[in-house]
Image (cartoon, coloured by chain):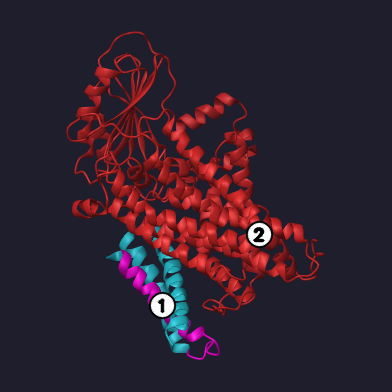
Chain colours: A cyan, B red
């Protein structure tokens, strides 16, 4: 469950960041931008608290990468097939 | 032709990135791919030895010692060294081996009954693990230096790549579909930047793993004599001291009691391996090592704790020391090996490793795509790089899948079977190389990727026909390894077919 929670927070964080940093939207939505970063920090904090320092940071950073990758792939798929 | 050195730092970094990337990228790709597979080393061995019982979490793996010790007394009482690898979630068998003046031996026992289990001769996942850092057919030291040079190139390429990338945050989620070279650039940036912490970590820790080989001078200065270095290694690693036999008979102390003592001092962590030197002799020693993959109790270090006991009196002679530098090294090693990770963690490692393969592959395709448009670029060089791309990016995966086919097709009683599986992999890879040289570029891509797809799609069928652990039986038994292998084969086959269909105008 912790794996899923950390991954979900990472995906949510990157999704929000992607919304604010997309073409022409760079820093135009400061609240969302800050929310995105908060979610990403939240993922790391949850991982560190629930798994302990070393393991938490290791897997947390890994899940941040996986989350970013999922958002990246998701946006490609939506852009390509979603319209 | 090599372009003159750029005027600005960013241009120079871009040039460094291109050349550090291109020189050993094919080697890096096979190192990354086999490294990614190595995260599932035990699972691959389990699939490649279908005679093994399904791995499961045992409440007390140490209980299997009651079968191992009588077996070794009965079959190898004259041997000078015994090694017992206890079963676990990732390996369903009790592995006992021995060596001595009369030679070596190994047997697999069922952990519940103690009966011998005959498994086919194969290197299994161990082959990918070893290949990842010492290749094959090459002298070990030469290969390790070569891998180290490639890893250093990779580290340089990563750092210079970050410095080259002007809009790393702004371009974070940019992907321009169907734009040829731009699409390859976006894909390369995507694979690189999104998993950058992993790429940096795995490359740096990979170099650290063999640091005393690559940068030996500090060790040489501190410990100039070979004996001193051996003593150091004996002190800090779980090595059995090479003391001679006394020749005096003495009863071996209770090994299960030593195992319990070790567990008590490791917060109840399970034991993974027990080694016994000179059993039944006055100089007997017992080395007990903890099982890896118990991060909740033992942390992420790549050096599990160990204890060395006198085999007659049971006195504790040595235990893993805790020193800052040694612990830091253990942590970096642990991060690289990823043995602390549970199964979702291992999948995460594998996914990020696959992103590394994607980064290397798209980097090569970007390189050729750029140069194809440059009128002054060497045609011979470009032709060669394009063929090497086909032979490595498509040909090596074909060869890896061929290894799995050979594992099922070669007769079980064949002599040197394990070696022939590996020879088969390299013969297929050689065939793919020749095919890439002879065929037009687009046909080469299409045919090799298509072949990889066909072989992958055929694997579940082959497994169903040649073993009793096909998909329906595995599903009924809840055997995650076999179910996962079949599903992943089909998914990767679809990916290969998709890539084969898309290989136009690259």
Q: Position of residue A47 (x, y in %)?
A: 35, 65
Q: Which residue is mark 1?
A: A13
Q: Position of residue A42 (x, y in %)?
A: 37, 73
Instruction: Tell me the magenta residue range.
Output: A3-29
Q: Height in image: B230 above or below B453? A: above
Figure quadrant of residue B495: bottom left
- Residue B473 versus residue B214: which sits nearer the camera? B473
User: Which quarter of the rendering shows the N terminus of chain B?
Assistant: bottom right
- Residue B233 versus residue B184: which sits nearer the camera? B184
**Residue at left offset 26%, top offset 30%:** B258
**Does the stretch in magenta take in A5?**
yes
User: Which quarter of the rendering shows the C terminus of chain B?
Assistant: bottom right
**Residue at left offset 45%, top offset 72%:** A68
Q: Chain of mark 1?
A: A
**Label 1 to label 2: alpha-carbon separation:** 39 Å
Q: Height in image: B284 above or below A47? A: above
- In the rendered image, is residue A64 in sight? yes
- Residue B26 versus residue B255: which sits nearer the camera? B26
| Same-chain status of marks 1 and 2 | no
Which label sits in the foreground, 1 or 2?
2
Q: Position of residue B129 (x, y in %)?
A: 46, 44
**Residue at left offset 41%, top offset 55%:** B456
- Residue B68 versus residue B380: which sits nearer the camera? B380
Q: Which mark is residue B390?
A: none
Check disc 1 and report its element: helix, strand or loop: helix
Q: Which residue is mark 2?
A: B386
In the picture, measured across the screen, residue B251 lies left or right of residue B81, that is left
Q: Chain of mark 2?
A: B
Q: Main secondary structure of the magenta part?
A: helix
Crowd around label 2: few <14 · some 14–19 · many ≥20 (10 Å): many
**Residue at left offset 53%, top offset 51%:** B396
């Amino acid at each position: 469950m912790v794996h899923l929670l950390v991954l979900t927070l990472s995906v949510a964080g990157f999704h929000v960041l992607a919304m604010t940093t997309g073409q022409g939207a760079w820093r135009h939505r400061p609240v969302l931008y800050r929310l995105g970063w908060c979610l990403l920090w939240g993922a790391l904090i949850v991982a560190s608290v629930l798994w302990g320092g070393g393991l938490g940071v290791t897997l947390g950073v890994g899940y941040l990468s996986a989350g970013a990758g999922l958002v990246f792939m998701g946006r490609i798929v939506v852009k390509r097939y979603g319209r | 032709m090599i372009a003159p050195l750029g005027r600005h730092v960013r241009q120079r970094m871009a040039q460094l990135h291109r050349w550090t990337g291109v020189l050993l990228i094919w080697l890096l790709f096979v190192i990354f791919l086999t490294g990614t597979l190595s995260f599932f080393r035990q699972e691959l061995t389990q699939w490649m030895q279908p005679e093994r019982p399904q791995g499961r979490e045992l409440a007390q793996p140490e209980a299997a010692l009651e079968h191992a010790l009588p077996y070794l007394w009965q079959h190898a009482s004259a041997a000078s060294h015994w090694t017992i690898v206890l079963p676990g979630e990732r390996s369903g068998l009790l592995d006992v081996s021995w060596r001595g003046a009369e030679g070596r031996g190994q047997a697999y026992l069922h952990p519940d009954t103690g009966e011998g289990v005959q498994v086919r001769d194969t290197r299994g996942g161990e082959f990918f693990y070893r290949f990842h850092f010492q290749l094959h057919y090459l002298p070990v030291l030469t290969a390790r230096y070569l891998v180290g040079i490639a890893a250093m190139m990779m580290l340089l390429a990563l750092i210079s790549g970050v410095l080259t990338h002007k809009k790393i945050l702004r371009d974070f989620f940019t992907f321009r579909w169907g734009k040829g070279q731009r699409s390859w650039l976006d894909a390369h940036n995507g694979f690189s930047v999104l998993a950058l912490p992993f790429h940096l970590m795995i490359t740096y820790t990979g170099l650290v793993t063999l640091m005393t080989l690559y940068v030996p001078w500090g060790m040489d200065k501190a410990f100039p004599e070979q004996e001193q270095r051996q003593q150091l290694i004996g002190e800090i690693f779980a090595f059995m001291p090479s003391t001679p036999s006394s020749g005096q008979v003495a009863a071996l102390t209770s090994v299960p009691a030593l195992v319990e003592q070790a567990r008590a001092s490791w917060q109840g962590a399970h034991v993974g391996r027990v080694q016994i030197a000179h059993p039944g002799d006055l100089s007997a020693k017992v080395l007990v090592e903890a099982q890896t993959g118990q991060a909740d109790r033992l942390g992420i270090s790549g050096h599990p704790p160990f204890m060395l006991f006198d085999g007659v009196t049971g006195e504790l002679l040595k235990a893993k020391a805790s020193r800052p530098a040694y612990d830091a090294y253990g942590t970096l090693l642990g991060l690289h090996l990823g043995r602390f990770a549970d199964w979702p963690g291992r999948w995460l490692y594998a996914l990020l490793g696959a992103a590394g393969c994607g980064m290397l592959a798209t980097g090569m395709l970007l390189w050729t795509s750029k140069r194809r448009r440059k009128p002054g670029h060497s045609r011979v060089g470009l032709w060669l790089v394009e063929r090497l791309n086909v032979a490595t990016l498509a040909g090596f995966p074909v060869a890896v899948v061929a290894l799995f086919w050979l594992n099922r097709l070669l007769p079980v009683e064949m002599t040197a079977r394990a070696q022939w599986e590996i020879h088969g992999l390299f013969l297929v890879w050689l065939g793919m190389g020749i095919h890439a040289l002879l065929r037009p570029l687009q046909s080469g891509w299409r045919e090799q990727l298509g072949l990889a797809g066909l072989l992958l799609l055929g694997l579940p069928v082959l497994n169903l026909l040649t073993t009793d652990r096909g998909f329906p039986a595995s599903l009924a038994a809840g055997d995650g390894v076999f179910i996962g292998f079949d599903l992943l084969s089909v998914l990767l086959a679809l990916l290969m077919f998709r890539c084969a269909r898309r290989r136009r105008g690259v």
